[in-house]
Amino acid sequence: MAAGTITRRDMSMGAGSIMAALGATGPAFAATGQSHAAVEDANAEISRNNAAIHQEVVFAASPARVYDALTVTDQFDRVVQLSAAMNSDMKKSLGAAPTRIDAEPGGAFSLFGGYVTGRMLELVANTRIVQAWRAGSWDPGRYSIATFALVQQGAGTRLVFDHTGFPDAAAVHLAEGWHINYWVPLAKFLA
């Protein structure tokens, strides 16, 4: 096989095999100022074990209606009031701050009595919401990324949700929390 040809086996073997398949050895590779060891060191620094949440939920409402429910303060406050957190003993530990959503890129939000806070990173009307999202129990300065993608599905909306960057130990609690504090009350609100 000619140098520069990458096989499926090379792809599964990692950066070293790919670099070798590309002929990244000898003088041409050395000219970049990197060595094979430097590439392998960089590869070792990449985590492939962080927890992530992926959920898909279908709502009997248009993407515009779902988008508004997630970005308009008074609408999302009604979702919060229907949530498990606000209808349990947990309400005592959430705080009393009002729901506040500044639906502009860079705008701040404060939810669930101030326990959940963050910033809007990207807003594409009726299509996508990306937030820097954090829970009050996390270490200061720790933010995760929550992405809500809204896809028209018949007369309803498929919400494709991805959450990354949170403390690994919080994964199970968060996965359950998205259902009982967001999706279930959101479905009730939209009904």
Image: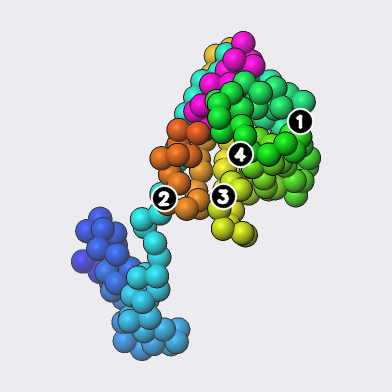
Q: Quadrant of the N terminus?
A: bottom left
Q: CA distance from mark 4 to mark 2?
A: 20 Å
Amino acid marked by disc 1? Thr
In the rendered view, does 9 fall on the left or right side of 177?
A: left
Asked if the residue at tag 2 contacts the one at tag 1, i.e. Cβ–Cβ closer than 8 Å, the answer is: no
Where disc 4 sits, the SS reads helix
Can see residue 151? no
Q: Which is nearer the eye, 63 or 69?
A: 69
Residue at mark 2:
169
Name which residue lies at 75% across and 38% down: 97
In the rendered view, does 94 fall on the left or right side of 109?
A: left
Return the x and y of residue 99 as percentages of the image width and height.
Answer: 74, 34
The part of the chain drawn in magenta is 178-191
Which of the two marks, 1 or 2, is nearer to us in this view? 2
Circle on res. 83:
none
Which of the two marks, 1 or 4, is nearer to us in this view? 4
Residue at mark 4:
93
In primary-sequence order, the first of circles 3 and 1 is 1
